[in-house]
Image (cartoon, rainbow, N blue to C red):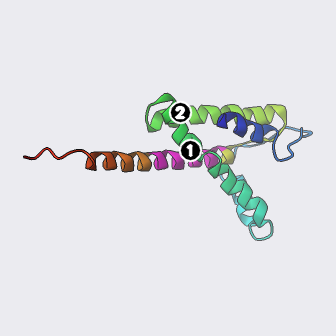
Amino acid sequence: MYTFLVAYWMLFGFGRQVQASYRYNFVPLQTIEVYWHWMRSHTRDSVINLLGNVLVFVPFGGLIPLAIGGGWWRMLAVHSAGIVVLEVAQLVSKRGSLDVDDFILNTLGAMLGYLLLTIVASFFSQRRVSQLPSTSP
């Protein structure tokens, strides 16, 4: 369900409309730099773009391993394939842009989600071990 929600946001949400031309950016950090410089005069828009592109993808870092198993590299491969599909869909539909910086920020979000999953899993694993009965006589 979350995947469909994110796909909706990326293609139709937030007032997205079909643009007159194809929009794309293949220069790493170019869009991030623009939003970073706009931070003083367009704080809300900059924060929504930069943090939003990270935070929206945090759940995938935990959900992908829980759904299909595997570790870090499998999560990263599945996440990357999904982001490429969504970014290309934005380009082809002209309802957004294909932006390498979105890929970077989205992947950072998924990596944070995976880190959170490992922290939570470690916490519960340690807690479970500490609750085992003692084996000493």
Give the x, y percent position of residue 100. 67, 44
Q: Residue at x 45, y 39 (%)?
A: 72
Q: Residue at x 74, y 60 (%)?
A: 46
Q: Is residue 129 magenta?
A: no
| SS of the residue under disc 2 | helix
Q: Residue at x 70, y 33 (%)?
A: 4
Give the x, y percent position of residue 26. 70, 43
Q: How many numbered marks appear? A: 2
Give the x, y percent position of residue 79. 58, 36
| SS of the residue under disc 1 | helix
Q: Quadrant of residue 8?
A: top right
Q: Quadrant of the N terminus?
A: top right
Tell me the tag on residue 129: none
Q: Amino acid at mark 2?
A: Ala
Tell me the tag on residue 110: 1
Span highlighted in magenta in the image: 103-117
Q: Mark 1, residues whose alpha carbon is within 10 Å: few (<14), some, or many (≥20)?
A: many
Give the x, y percent position of residue 48. 73, 57
- The single residue placed furthest to the top in the displayed view is 68
Distance from Cα at disc 2 to Cα at disc 1: 11 Å
Residue tagged 2: 77
